[in-house]
């Protein structure tokens, strides 16, 4: 076997061989762990969304996360905030941490994640989640449409914060009548190789290919007025004669009698 490695100046992750070659873990679990470790600190994504945006199903992701939890690479704790509320917080390690939950040991290159007020997760069998709160319905609709559009292209995998950053642009497409299929047609063809920044590529294409707004329909023309019926000759002549008689002081002319 000959191994070919490329020199990378940016957008790369350094992982220990012990992690990548840990035969206690399935290849699915190792791949998922490598994906999680490639994300920036503070990245949030729901476990169900991780499954829905990959070729693996929810069952496979659930089993992989359980493997990583049992091996000490993944842990979900509940943290009590200063205001008294409790939230779930996920921790991912590149070196197994086998201590009790809430007393994780710091590792080289990592940060101290031990907290005196950290509480163990409620149900270890439940799919751990990374909290992801979306601000409103429009943003949720835009994020959902974006994920549906890029799902066929694994190189465009995004986290929730990245998708939320693109949501205003996607929202403009939706306001102009575009669908997820329209987005896919605009975003997926002709991607560069290698693809260093999915967010930058998507942002550029969303801006450049934004469809024009719908043209407003011109105002409706007013309905034509019905023509007036012309006055009869007899009525017109009688009125003129009465007017002349009044001017000469003769008094009003009697009304003409109807013919027998």
Image (spheres, grey):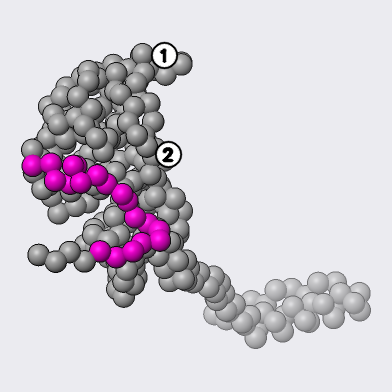
Coordinates of residue 93 in the picture (x, y in percent): 27, 35
Work out whether residue 144 can be spotted. yes
Which image quarter is the N terminus in? bottom left
View extreme (right): residue: 248
Q: Which residues are magenta?
A: 5-23
Marks 2/1: CA–CA distance: 22 Å
Local crowd size for mark 2, using a 10 Å CA cut-off: few (<14), some (14–19), many (≥20) = few
What residue sits right under mark 1 in the picture?
84
Asked if residue 249 lies in the magenta stretch, the reply is no
What residue is at 21 percent from the left and 66 percent from the top?
4
Please determine whether, in this image, residue 147 is positioned above or below residue 107: below
Give the number of marks. 2
Foreground mark, 2 or 1, reads 1
Coordinates of residue 15 in the picture (x, y in percent): 27, 46
What residue is at 23 percent from the left and 27 percent from the top?
97
Coordinates of residue 61 in the picture (x, y in percent): 14, 42
Viewer-nearest residue: 259 or 173: 173
Does the residue at mark 2 contact the one at mark 1 (Cβ under 8 Å)? no
Find numbered disc 1 in the image and state the secondary structure of the residue it sits on. loop
Which image quarter is the C terminus in? bottom right
What residue is at 14 percent from the left and 31 percent from the top?
71
What residue is at 85 percent from the left and 81 percent from the top?
244
What numbered label is drawn on residue 135?
A: 2
């Amino acid at each position: 076997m000959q191994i070919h490695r490329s020199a990378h100046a940016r957008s790369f992750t350094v992982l220990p061989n012990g992690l990548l070659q840990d035969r206690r873990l399935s290849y699915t679990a190792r791949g998922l762990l490598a994906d999680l470790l490639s994300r920036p600190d503070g990245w949030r994504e729901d476990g169900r969304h991780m499954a829905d945006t990959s070729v693996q199903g929810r069952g496979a992701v659930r089993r992989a996360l359980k493997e990583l939890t049992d091996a000490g690479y993944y842990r979900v704790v509940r943290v009590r905030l200063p205001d008294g509320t409790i939230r779930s917080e996920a921790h991912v390690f590149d070196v197994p941490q086998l201590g009790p939950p809430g007393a994780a040991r710091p590792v080289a290159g990592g940060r101290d994640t031990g907290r005196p007020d950290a509480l163990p997760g409620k149900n270890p069998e439940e799919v751990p989640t990374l909290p992801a709160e979306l601000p409103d319905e429009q943003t949720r609709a835009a994020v959902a449409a974006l994920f549906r559009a890029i799902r066929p292209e694994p190189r465009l995998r995004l986290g929730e914060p990245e998708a939320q950053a693109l949501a205003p642009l996607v929202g403009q497409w939706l306001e102009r009548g575009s669908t997820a299929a329209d987005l896919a047609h605009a975003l997926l063809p002709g991607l560069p190789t290698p693809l260093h920044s999915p967010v930058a590529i998507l942002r550029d294409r969303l801006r450049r290919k934004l469809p024009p707004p719908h043209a407003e329909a011109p105002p409706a023309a007013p309905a034509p007025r019905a023509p007036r019926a012309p006055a009869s000759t007899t009525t017109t002549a009688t009125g003129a004669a009465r007017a002349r008689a009044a001017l000469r002081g003769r008094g009003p002319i009697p009304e003409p009698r109807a013919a027998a």
